[in-house]
Image: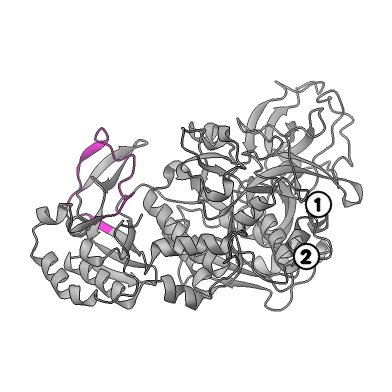
Amino acid sequence: MRSTRAALRAGAGLAATLPLLAGALALATPAAQAATGPDRDTLHGTRPAWATAEADKGASADGSRVSARVYLAGRDATGLAAYAKAVSDPSSPSYGRYLSAGQARARFGATKTQIAAVKAWLKSAGLDVTGATRRYVSVSGDVAAAERAFGTQLHNYRKDGHTYRAPARTASAPAALNGAVLTVTGLDTAPHRATHDDELPPPDQVFRNAGPFSSYYGSTVASTLPDAYGTKIPYAVKGYTGKQLRAAYGAGSRTGKGVRVAITDAYASPTIAADAATYASKHGDAAYRGGQLRQVLPRNYTHTTDCNASGWYGEETLDVEAVHAVAPASDIVYVGSASCQDDDLIDALGKIVDGHLADIVSNSWGDIEANQTPDLAAAYDQVFQLGAVEGIGFYFSSGDDGDEVANTGTKQVDTPANSAWVTAVGGTSLAVGKGDAYRWETGWGTLKATLAADGKSWTDFPGAFTSGAGGGTSRTVAQPFYQRGVVPRSLAEANGSTPHRTVPDIAAIADPNTGFLIGQTQTLPSGGQAYDEYRIGGTSLAAPVVAGVQALAQEARGGHPLGFANPAIYARYGTHVFHDVTDDPTGAGLAVARVDYVNGYDAADGVTTSVRTLGRDSSLRAVRGYDDVTGVGSPGKGYVESYRR
């Protein structure tokens, strides 16, 4: 978080402080520089909650290396948030009056004078400046220099069985910088890595679904398998395609023509262009025009082992093919991150904002809220707010582990989906019937029971929870204005008497048992590579589907950007334009049968047969009205055209 001191709006007068500032830092003793008071601005949130006295294992060695980023607050951080709200709120007279990327930089970006002052401060402490952008200055050096610069000691702490470094108290910056510093990241060394939220294992080796399948929901009944909920159940769909999803979410004649959609993930699939073209041809989607799909990639990739780089290829493939399936005329730009580390992902998002590469940004990655520190939250939010003033909306998957209790032991939401400045996309199970007719949706939450050895019953039916749409109430983010009066108090105040951000905002298909078919080049068991197809789900699917629907809505709006969409989405709450999704829309219990290869690709090692109950998401419930599985619901038949001007 930035200092409470007023930001320098134009940089005037700061240059005059530079010689005095540099000299003061050079002559000050380490003890004096560690002091807080009127000569230091606190950088709130830079000491992580896990850095407690009980976990303290002593001071870090002075010679240990530190790499950090000092994020810049810009001219007017308070004004940035206020303007982002005003242009996003349909009730505001400034609604839709977006700035260009250049105008946003001129009004809210850091000045050259501010950047120079921050560099001088860091160098005077003994740190090496390794890079600088419009948003941050990166530095490296030893612990002793970092302690001098940020006015805190660095200690070692035990966390989750490991030892990490962190500030012993909240970091600070010189008050003479006049609030030019937003925050600093990198002083703590605990892992900050995003994971992609697709439900199936990463397809480094070929993955195939075993049949039988339904071609649409209910088309093939498992007549030889035991009943579930008093009836014969259908086999899982082979995987919906674009035609079915467009019908389910009210695309009509809209195609997303003239709209730019960006996708961010880590790394980049080397076969994405060929795979996307093959998939579109096989499944009736429009062929890609020249330049319709392009990639913006970093010069180098890092942390490829830690981040399982090849596992992200399937994520990119899913995102690209889902957006094109829903909005086949939209232009897609894939912006790859150098790694799954937060700083690199922020860089990818920043490229979109700096160059206004798209109006809609789909992001199918994240981490649990407990792993996010306030310093990182501030850096993310600054990018999201800058995007909002330019008319750019960010859509994030809400996660695939329900309330996260089964995964982490603690009820919590995912991040960055918890940000008040993004649209969090939850998940549903979708039934598309004969003739591409929308039948119903449930909140996505799966229980699994397997077929007994005698084939006459299901073992411990309905079974254990396996996966479900992420959702719930943030412990760190206050309730945003657009959720007031919509989110029930029982959810908003789930963690105390103060209302907090509740996730998600909107939802779409996510259940892998009613999932989407994608095509990707994969490694064959016998060696070599070939294009193959498989069904996939997760809120990694829901996010690009909603991004595609938003592209249709922007087309309906005459091409005018929707910007940060939450205020407009909540303004439509309770109307016919949403499917009000509940857990048991038929009142009789819902389940599908599924057959899977034991080895993931053929029957050589046998198959397993299971029943998957739908609409049972951990402790979360999809009910009438707003809920923490599907938000306000999924886009209905009238949603796209409700934006028509």
Measuring from the top left, give residue 146's x and y in whole percent: 22, 58
Q: Nearer the viewer, residue 178 or 598?
A: 178
Q: Which residue is mark 2?
A: 280
Residue 303 visible in image = no
Tell me the residue at 49%/35% (across/down): 408
> Main SS type for the magenta part?
loop
Q: Which mark is residue 248?
A: 1
Mark 2 residue element: helix
Vertical placement of residue 567 versus 406, above or below: below
Kindly give the residue lying farthest to the right in the view shown: 435
Between 462 and 20, the residue placed more toward the observer is: 20
- Frontmost residue, 89 versus 195: 89
The secondary structure type at the circle numbered 1 is helix
Q: Is residue 307 left or right of residue 432?
A: left
Q: Looking at the rendering, in which quadrant would you find the C terminus?
A: bottom right
Dividing the image into 4 quarters, which one contains the N terminus?
A: bottom left
Range of the magenta residues?
A: 42-66
Using a 10 Å C-alpha cutoff, classify the residue at mark 2 as few (fewer than 14 neighbours), some (14 to 19) or many (20 or more).
many
Q: CA distance from mark 2 to mark 1?
A: 19 Å
